[in-house]
Amino acid sequence: MVVPKAEVEKRMKLFAQTCRRSGLKMTHQRTEVFRELATRDDHPGAETVFREVRRRVPAISRDTVYRTLALLEAQGLIRKAEILFNQGRYDANTERHHHFVCTVCGRVQDFYSAALDGLPLPRSLKSLGRVQSAQVQVRGVCSACAAGGSKRRRTK
């Protein structure tokens, strides 16, 4: 699924505003790392972001990409979700949403549900600490894998 151009522009505008507000330099490298995430909905890992940005910015280092991802996360511009095998996957969609994870190919897809957003959290969580956010992760076989009959499993 392609992120609509209007949504990409909205995300890029938020990136620029956040950089100005926080006093961060809006470097070409930071912009390209964020743009890579703003245009995608597949929640890529850091190595995928590095490979894709490096096609456009050959001089970018792996360290710069990792540091930029951490900075973008600290600024609230992206979210890191540890979805598969504790591998961090990044998402520029910071609106409240949930994830469908394909157990065959590893694809991660956003979905929205007012019903899930409204689920009350158990009182027992108070003894564990203060909840800052909650989301539901649903695991199953995506339509493409179901149609293709793939038997290769990536997660449990």
Image (spheres, rainbow, N blue to C red):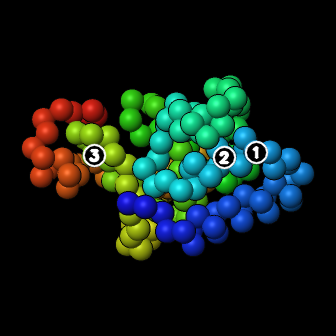
Residue 72: image location, x then y, percent:
69, 46
Name the residue beneath numbered marker 3: 102
Can residue 120 be spotted in the picture?
Answer: no
Q: Residues within 10 Å of mark 3 (few under 14, many from 20)?
A: many
SS type, badge 2:
helix
Mark 2 and mark 1 residues within 8 Å of each other at the beta carbon: yes
Q: Nearer the viewer, mark 1 or mark 3?
A: 1
Q: Is residue 13 left or right of residue 150?
A: right
Q: Is residue 21 left or right of residue 78?
A: right
Tally of numbered discs: 3
Kind of residue at badge 3: Cys
Residue 38: image location, x then y, percent:
58, 56
Cα gap from disc 3 to disc 2, whole angstroms: 28 Å
Give residue 28's mark.
Answer: 1
Q: Is residue 4 left or right of residue 131?
A: left
Residue 55: image location, x then y, percent:
57, 36
Cα gap from disc 1 to disc 3, whole angstroms: 34 Å
Q: Quadrant of residue 117?
A: bottom left
